[in-house]
Image (spheres, rainbow, N blue to C red):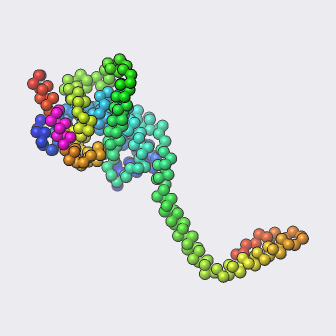
Amino acid sequence: MSDETDLVVRARAGDRDAFGVLVERYAGPARRVARSVLDDPDDADDAAQDAFLSALVKLGQFDPRRPFGPWLLRIVANAATDRRRRRKVRRTEALDPAVRSPEPGPDADAVRSELGMLLRAALAELPERRRLAVVLFDVEGYGHAEIGRILGVPEGTVRSDVFHARRFLRGRLAGWKEET
Amino acid sequence: MGSPFFHGRDPELGAALRRALEPGDEAAFVARVRGALATVRPRTWDVLEQWAGRGLVAAALAVLAAGLVVARTGRDAAGLDEAFAAAFADSAVAFAAETPPDPSVVFATPGGR
């Protein structure tokens, strides 16, 4: 039994410390995936936390013989997408000036990075599935087939999404390089 | 960065995206989630679902054991019938009597006779 399978089995049996180790292990990927969907870092962290708690509740439905990461990241992607939809509705309903002009978030270092800002802005222009596909492939290192299972689309669609996302991001980066 | 037609990894784009999405202060986030874990209770249905498999195995074993007992006692069915008949006859006499019956007769089981 692999280390991760053992952790999942123990977590399923009610061992919260074992689940805590899984949280440590997947905090980075979960937060990055959530951040690729949600512009606001606090929103992204809230979505990632919701996803971890939801995963704990649903752990009985998970087959421990399968890899935990893709299953968790599917929950993260759904949590982030739901939060984004709800936020859009709230913004349409009530145009709060504070929401329209948010204060700088806690990731001030990243915001200061011009390239980081440019990439986040470029990601935000992409359709949601393309953002997730390129982040899961080029940042998190998952294969096309696995990403297909995470996003619930065929492998060919993932290849196409990664291709279009890369082309778009490279176009933006090329423009930025010419300016600087 | 390489051609978009390339289907392998793009380490340069990957690293740039990772830096752009890096949320920072992972320890604080993990501590926050660990704290929230204590508030989560598993849903009743999920707990029942986890027990369902074990419950079915236990039920199957119980049925098997009951079948074995019935198969064994079936061989002595005639003897059991006679014992029951005798027990009910004694009961009828006891109820018809004017004086209270002997408790050892009332509580005697057919098998114990």
Q: Is residue A160 above or below residue B81?
A: above
Q: Can I make out residue A116 in this image?
A: no
The reply to whether the magenta stretch includes residue A162 is yes
Q: Considering the image in quadrants, where does the N terminus of chain A appear? A: bottom left
Corner quadrant of residue A87: top left
Picture quadrant of residue B72: bottom right
Residue A38 visible in rendering = yes
Q: Quadrant of the C terminus of chain A?
A: top left
Q: Is residue B113 left or right of residue B33?
A: right
Residue shown at the point (25%, 26%) measured from the top left: A110
| Residue pictured at 17% horizontal, 42% vertical | B9
Q: Position of residue B68 (x, y in %)?
A: 55, 74
Q: Position of residue A8 (x, y in %)?
A: 38, 48
Which residue is farthest right?
Answer: B98
Q: Residue at x 17, y 40 (%)?
A: A163
| Direction from residue B54 to residue A72 in the image, left or right | left
Main SS, magenta region, reads helix
Tally of numbered tags: 0
Residue A146 is a magenta residue: no
Q: Which residues are magenta?
A: A160-169
Viewer-proximal residue among A37 and B10:
A37
Residue A43 is situated, as x and y percent measured from the top left of the image, at 35, 29
